[in-house]
């Protein structure tokens, strides 16, 4: 009876810890987003939709971080990490339309060539994806090892 | 395997921070970039060329150098054919530096007006395409382009040759008087002379005359020309060949029938 109580307490403590960790991570990401958006304010006025693109990205990314963190210690965490890395690659490619962003502002056509940035970001995202896959493989192998012994 | 995974994580995070910081600061520093386009000036050179000059001052107070600054101007006629094209290129504008440059574009007025008499006699609209390109932090290419139209005023707008009035000059010659008129809609003053050759129906030259002209911009010119024709060659029908020899262009012959 005492052991069962202890186990429930440990679980509760674990869930609370993970939830706290998830909250802190979400807050950190949101703070980074706020800091970056302040710098991007002059450009946001010129490029319509930029603010929305960034906001959607941040929302989905924070959601995946929070869910991944809450599910830490399970295979689902690894799945969410992979999903997050994939999301970054796909979202960058789609939202930046292959690296060239164009907008028309008062008879002036403005074109921003972000292909170099996109290439670097895609490579880093792929590195993140590889890391998440390694983590998943490592997690599964660690789970499998004790049963073999 | 945990250590290599952690190392990948650390390296990825470091590069992400570096990439985002670089990108955000490069874009943010655009607000510290100042472009001052001066008053465009149009003048005529000694080589009979129209010189379009645009002074530009660039002040780079941003965090990074600006690379490959390029200002291109293209002038098109109303049918979309290119008349003139010029680019001004600055390889690097260092941060904290104020650079003044002049974007000079020349149009060969003599060649243009000789080949396209539309510009001599009719007002039209020219389309100007202006494009500014640069590399933010020498890495992120940005380009802004715009189109606008500019009216072209014809220097010999509504050029008209009046009726020929003949009167006896002496026993051998007749004085033929022709009134010519036009409006100078161009942005330059027209100075030079007009030469007129009169031919009869058999393509024989029967008289000639010339007149100095001086028509300031946006003014109407009207004057009469006198030609002395042999009394035996009284002008009844034929044609006139008119040549315009001005400080900016030469054009001719403009053939106008009479009679």
Image (cartoon, coloured by chain):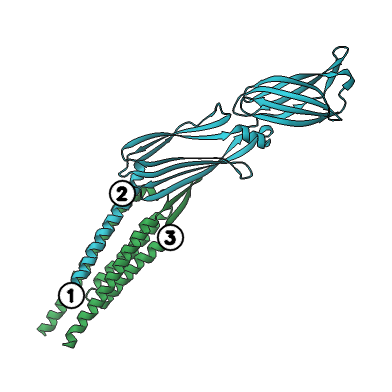
Chain colours: A green, B cyan
Residue B223, labelled with which disc?
A: none
Q: Which residue in the protein does label 3 denote?
A: A98
Left or right: B183 with respect to B83?
A: right
Q: Which residue in the protein does label 2 denote?
A: B25
Which element carries disc 3, helix, strand or loop? helix
Mark 3 and mark 1: span between their CA atoms? 46 Å
Mark 2 and mark 1: span between their CA atoms? 44 Å
- Front-most of residues B11 and A88: B11
- Front-most of residues B208 and B94: B208
- Answer yes or no: do the residues labelled 3 and 2 have beta carbons within 8 Å? no
Residue A33 sits above or below residue B162 on the image: below
Q: Are marks 3 and 1 on the same chain?
A: yes
Q: Quadrant of residue B253?
A: top right
Percent coordinates x, y for residue B186 in the rendering: 62, 29
Seen as rendered, the residue at the extreme bottom is: A148
Percent coordinates x, y for residue A85 in the rendering: 32, 68
């Amino acid at each position: 009876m005492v052991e069962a109580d202890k186990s429930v307490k440990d679980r509760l403590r674990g869930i609370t810890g993970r939830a706290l960790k998830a909250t802190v991570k979400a807050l950190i990401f949101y703070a980074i987003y706020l800091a970056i958006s302040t710098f991007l304010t002059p450009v946001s006025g010129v490029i319509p939709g930029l603010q929305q693109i960034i906001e959607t990205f941040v929302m989905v990314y924070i959601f995946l971080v929070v869910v991944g963190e809450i599910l830490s210690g399970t295979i689902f965490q690894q799945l969410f990490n992979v999903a997050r890395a994939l999301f970054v690659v796909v979202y960058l490619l789609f939202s930046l339309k292959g690296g060239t962003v164009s907008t028309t502002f008062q008879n002036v056509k403005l074109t921003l060539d972000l292909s170099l940035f996109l290439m670097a970001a895609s490579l880093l995202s792929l590195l993140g994806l590889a890391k998440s896959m390694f983590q998943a493989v490592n997690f599964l192998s660690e789970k499998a090892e004790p049963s073999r012994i | 395997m945990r250590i290599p995974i952690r190392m990948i994580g650390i390296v990825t995070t470091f590069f992400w921070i570096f990439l985002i910081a670089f990108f955000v600061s490069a874009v943010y520093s655009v607000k510290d970039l100042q472009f001052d386009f001066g008053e465009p000036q149009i003048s005529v050179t000694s080589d009979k060329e129209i010189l379009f000059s645009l002074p530009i001052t660039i002040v780079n107070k941003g965090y990074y150098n600006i690379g490959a600054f390029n200002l291109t101007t293209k002038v098109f006629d109303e049918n979309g054919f290119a008349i003139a094209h010029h680019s001004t290129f600055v390889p690097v504008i260092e941060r904290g530096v104020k650079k003044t440059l002049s974007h000079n574009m020349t149009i060969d007025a003599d060649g243009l007006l000789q080949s396209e008499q539309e510009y001599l006699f009719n007002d039209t609209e020219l389309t100007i395409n202006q494009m500014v390109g640069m590399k933010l932090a020498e890495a992120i290419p940005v380009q802004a382009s715009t189109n606008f139209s500019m009216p072209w005023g014809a220097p010999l707008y509504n050029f008209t040759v009046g009726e020929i009035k003949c009167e006896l000059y002496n026993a051998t010659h007749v004085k033929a008087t022709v009134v010519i008129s036009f409006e100078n809609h161009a942005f330059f003053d027209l100075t030079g002379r007009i030469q007129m050759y009169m031919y009869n129906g058999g393509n024989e030259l029967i008289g000639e005359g010339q007149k100095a002209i001086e028509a300031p911009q946006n003014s109407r010119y009207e004057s009469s020309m006198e030609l002395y024709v042999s009394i035996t060659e009284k002008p009844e029908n034929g044609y006139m060949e008119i040549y315009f020899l001005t400080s900016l262009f030469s054009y001719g012959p403009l053939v106008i029938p009479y009679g």
